[in-house]
């Protein structure tokens, strides 16, 4: 693959401009005010796949946001790589914390990114990382070096639970048949410490509503005599962890996969600097479940976190009031063997049972998904490892991460395929946060690495079947 570097040098400006255009469209899947922008983004992705040289490029309408499909089939006997990514993004708020508008991408140099980083919502998660694949495939098709078949499936609902894609996958198993799924929607340990994500956590996301009196009340006239839903909700939430930061929901840990001493020792070899971690977050200490390291707490252990809490008066000054209702959104990150539907039920039963007389509690389940672990003794993993070794000059470290891409376990269930999580972002990219960015170096390194994955995967498939 002599000339991928040359190709990148020649086309670098265009690669950056094209990504910039994609980032300008606010494809916020969660907010219906942006439905047309989501549709426009799907249209742009379709056009770019056609320009790259793909065939059968189609936008599939769904009950939710559209899915873009494309393929380049060379021959039935060749292996097929299915690329998955998402073109939708998280809402950009709070807007006032962005140094530049989230949908007006700009490249800025930083200490961490001397070659510049592109700042925009979706730069790293996942438009920038998804687009690397279109450019890598463009290179292979345009220079006649595509060694195998490729299919693309780019969705617009990842950030809201991939509902439409679940149906799409179940209904198009033949169309989506593949030998391996390749995804860039995760990160590296650092630009000089390459890694491949071998595990993702599952998720159960719920909303709770606590209702007390039938209306807001004067907190002097009624205070002390009726249950205050906000006080009660705060107590209920606090009781979900014990003094060791274990989760108190009965049965929550019943099916949690326990790692052997050896596996934990292996994990501990991954470089991790707790002081740098604390400094980056401006915290005096890390915090979490007793008996586990920071890396373990944030990857192989399940968690429960309040994501939002509201109710009562939050305007200027003071208003003496007992609100009728209090609300919270809660996510639980799950690990292999925990069933997200079962955990959701356990949460619901526990939360409802815990409510004192004088309030009523409603638990509204949102979305969820299973955890995923990818084995490393496979051709897919070896191909990714060799590809990164070629372009980074170092063997990547296999590493389980705490984030979730719930659809990945469904791919395995429905299509019987493993997914390779070869991401090029950094934890410091501020995904889902203000000032999200993606290093120009990372973007180009991804484009450089992807064609090697294709050639190693094809080679290894041939050798193993001979
Ligand atoms: N790309 C992320 C997940 C991710 C990021 C995994 C970095 C590992 C490392 C994905 O877009 C995401 O944000 N997923 C959501 C779940 C989804 C159902 C909203 C998450 O993890 O919160
Ligand atoms: Mn993502
Ligand atoms: Mn995301």
Image: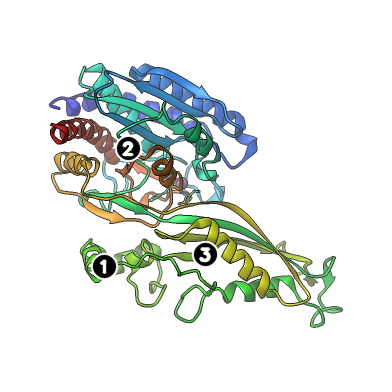
285 relative position to 307: left or right: left
Residue drawn at the location 45% of the way across and 69% of the way down: 254
Q: What colouring does the structure picture have? A: rainbow
Q: What residue sits right under mark 2 in the picture? A: 182
Residue most extreme to the front: 466
Residue named by callout 3:
305
Q: Quadrant of the C terminus?
A: top left
Frontmost residue, 34 versus 14: 34
The answer to which quarter of the image holds residue 37 is: top right
For ligand 1, tell me if the residue under mark 1 lies within 8 Å. Answer: no
Q: Position of residue 61 (x, y in %)?
A: 56, 26
Which quadrant of the rendered structure holds the N terminus? top left
Q: Earlier in the sequence, mark 1 or mark 3?
A: 1
Residue, disc 1: 264
Mark 3 is surrounded, within 10 Å at the Cα level, by few (under 14), some (14 to 19) or many (20 or more) other residues, namely few
Q: Position of residue 384 (x, y in %)?
A: 22, 41
Looking at the image, tell me whether mark 2 or mark 1 is earlier in sequence order.
2
Name the residue rendered at 66%, 75% in the picture: 354
The answer to whether the residue bearing label 2 lies less than 8 angstroms from the nearest atom of ligand 2 is: no
Judge from the rendering whether residue 391 lies leftward or rightward of residue 129; answer left or right: left
Picture quadrant where residue 411 is located: top left
Helix, strand, or loop for circle 2?
strand
Residue closest to the eye, 264 or 466: 466
Q: Residue at x 81, y 78 (%)?
A: 226
Closer-to-camera residue (299/432): 299
Task: Indicate yes or no: mark 3 CB to ligand 1 under 8 Å.
Answer: no
* Position of residue 357 in the picture relative to residue 110 (left or right): right
Q: CA distance from mark 2 to mark 1?
A: 27 Å
Q: Residues within 10 Å of mark 2 (few under 14, many from 20)?
A: many
Tell whether label 3 touches label 1 (CB within 8 Å): no
């Amino acid at each position: 693959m002599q000339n991928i570097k040359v190709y990148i040098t020649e086309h670098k400006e265009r690669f950056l401009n094209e990504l910039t255009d994609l980032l300008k469209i606010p494809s916020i899947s969660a907010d219906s005010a942006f439905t047309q922008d989501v549709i426009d983004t799907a249209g742009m992705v379709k056009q770019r796949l056609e320009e790259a040289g793909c065939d059968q490029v189609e936008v599939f309408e769904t009950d939710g946001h559209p899915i873009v499909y494309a393929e380049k089939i060379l021959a039935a006997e060749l292996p097929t790589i299915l690329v998955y990514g998402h073109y939708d993004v998280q809402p950009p708020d709070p807007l006032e914390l962005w140094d530049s508008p989230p949908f007006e991408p700009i490249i800025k140099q930083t200490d961490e990114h001397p070659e510049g980083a592109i700042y925009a919502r979706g730069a790293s998660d996942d438009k920038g990382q998804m687009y690397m694949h279109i450019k890598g495939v463009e290179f292979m098709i345009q220079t006649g070096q595509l060694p195998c078949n490729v299919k693309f499936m780019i969705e617009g609902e990842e950030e809201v639970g991939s509902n439409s894609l679940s149906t799409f996958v179940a209904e198009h198993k033949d169309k989506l048949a593949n030998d391996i799924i390749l995804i860039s929607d995760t990160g590296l340990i650092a630009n000089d410490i390459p890694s491949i994500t071998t595990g993702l956590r599952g998720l159960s996301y719920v909303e709770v509503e606590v209702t007390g009196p039938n209306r807001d009340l004067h907190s002097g006239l009624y205070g002390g005599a009726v249950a205050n839903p906000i006080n009660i909700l705060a107590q209920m939430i606090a009781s979900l962890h014990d003094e060791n930061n274990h989760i108190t929901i009965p049965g929550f840990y019943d099916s949690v996969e326990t790692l052997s001493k050896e596996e934990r020792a292996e994990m501990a070899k991954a470089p991790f600097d707790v002081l740098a971690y604390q400094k980056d977050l401006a915290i005096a200490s890390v915090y979490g479940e007793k008996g586990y390291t920071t890396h373990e707490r944030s990857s192989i252990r399940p968690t429960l976190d309040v994501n939002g809490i509201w109710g009562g008066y939050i305007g200027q000054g003071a208003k003496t009031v007992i609100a009728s209702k209090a609300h919270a959104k809660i996510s639980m990150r799950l690990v292999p063997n925990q069933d997200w539907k079962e955990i959701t039920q356990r949460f619901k039963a526990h939360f409802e049972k815990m409510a004192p007389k004088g309030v009523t509690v409603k638990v509204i389940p949102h979305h969820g998904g299973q955890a995923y672990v990818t084995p490393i003794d496979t051709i897919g993993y070896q191909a990714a490892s060799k590809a990164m070794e070629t372009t980074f000059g170092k063997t990547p470290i296999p590493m389980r991460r705490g984030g979730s891409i719930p659809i990945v376990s469904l791919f395995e269930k429905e299509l019987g395929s493993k997914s390779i999580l070869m991401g090029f972002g950094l934890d410091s990219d501020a995904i889902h946060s203000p000032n999200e960015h993606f290093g120009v170096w990372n973007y180009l390194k991804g484009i450089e690495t992807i064609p090697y994955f294709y050639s190693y995967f094809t080679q290894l498939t041939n050798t193993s079947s001979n």
